[in-house]
Image (spheres, rainbow, N blue to C red):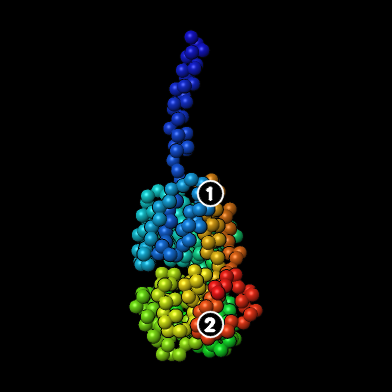
Amino acid sequence: MRGGRRRILRILGGLALAPVAVRAQVRRPRVGVLVPAEVQWDEAAFRDELSRLVQAELEVRSAAGKLSALPGLAKGLVDSGVDVLVAANTPGGRAAAAATKVVPIVVGVVSEPGLVGVRNISRPEGNITGVTNMAGEIVAKRLEVLKQALPVARRVAGLIHPDEPIVKPQIRDLEQAGAVLQVEMRYFPARTEQDIQDAFAEAAAWRADAVLRLAGQALTLSDVTVRLSIERRIPAMMLTSAEVRAGALLSYFADHAAIWRRVAQYVDRLLKGAKVSELPFERPTKFELAINLRTARALGIAIPPALILRADRVIE
């Protein structure tokens, strides 16, 4: 009888503990994703990598290109009880940082960690870490590559989103690089498709030899930018190989698919107990140069063979 009582007590004790164990086994962690626009992140790369590592529920909220909507969306994700908050680029990262000082935040494709409040990149002191795309640091290199592809270029139109914090440091570096490369830069603000159309008309009137799309909400207007560069016959330096496949002359930028896979790995580590301070803010390890030779031939541009050999992707 005494043994039976002990067995009953063990069973009751097990039942008392069961809800916690069941919750631990059944409840999937929730990951919130905040993006200024759907095209601003590589969803497929992120989802594929995260699902390989951990079973988690994703809640994606997009501002659909309206940066003013980001703070409200970020607060909504925090209030919904997400375990980790992922944010795309600088405006997304800033909105996430303003929404919480507690929930771990992983920022993807932010240009400069300092712009989202991260001062110590090797050991983040707050609740934010992530992976930069070094957009600000490589903009001078992008102009140099454009000049190598088009040595005769003397005037280059820079397309910018005027509300993006990363625009100012890019312009600073472009002015310095332009002086060395003997390239005059002029900048054309564009928030909407109509703005892009106006910018190309003004760039053509200025007799721009090429267009360079600066980082910062660029992908939201990618299609129209590439289309107008073809229609206006103004060679364009864009940000992704997908834009080059669509007809842009070339692109040089960090491999965003690789960045978003790394972001997923950071999320996995946080969900499994790592602290933000243990996850240094990382830089990309791979940059892609893509060249569209069909576009070059259509524009009468002879791309130097040495540059073609350096390219990661060549569209014949």
Q: Are marks 2 and 1 in contact (CB under 8 Å)?
A: no
How many circles with numbers are drawn on the protein?
Answer: 2
The circle on residue 52 is: 1
For this orientation, the residue located farthest to the top is 1
Q: Is 28 situated left or right of 125 in this image?
A: left
Q: Dot 1 surroundings within 10 Å: few (below 14), some, or many (20 or more)?
A: few
**Quadrant housing residue 223:** bottom left
Give 210 or 169, whichever is nearer the viewer: 210
Residue at 46% x, 58% y: name it.
Answer: 43
Compared with residue 252, is residue 63 higher up or lower down, i.e. above or below? above
Give 31 or 156, whichever is nearer the viewer: 156
| Residue 3 in the image, given as x and y percentages of width and height | 51, 12
| Residue 45 in the image, given as x and y percentages of width and height | 51, 57
The circle on residue 209 is: none
Q: Earlier in the sequence, mark 2 or mark 1?
A: 1
| Whether residue 41 is visible | yes
Circle 2: residue type = Arg
Residue at 54% x, 57% y: name it.
Answer: 261
**Quadrant housing residue 258:** bottom right
| Whether residue 100 is visible | no
Residue at 44% x, 40% y: name it.
Answer: 27
Residue that mark 2 sits on = 297
Label 2: which secondary element: helix
Q: Dot 2 surroundings within 10 Å: few (below 14), some, or many (20 or more)?
A: few
Circle 1: residue type = Arg
State the separation of the CA atoms marked 2 and 1: 43 Å
| Residue 232 in the image, given as x and y percentages of width and height | 42, 84
Label 1: which secondary element: helix
Compared with residue 74, is residue 269 higher up or lower down, i.e. above or below? above
Compared with residue 15, is residue 44 higher up or lower down, i.e. above or below? below
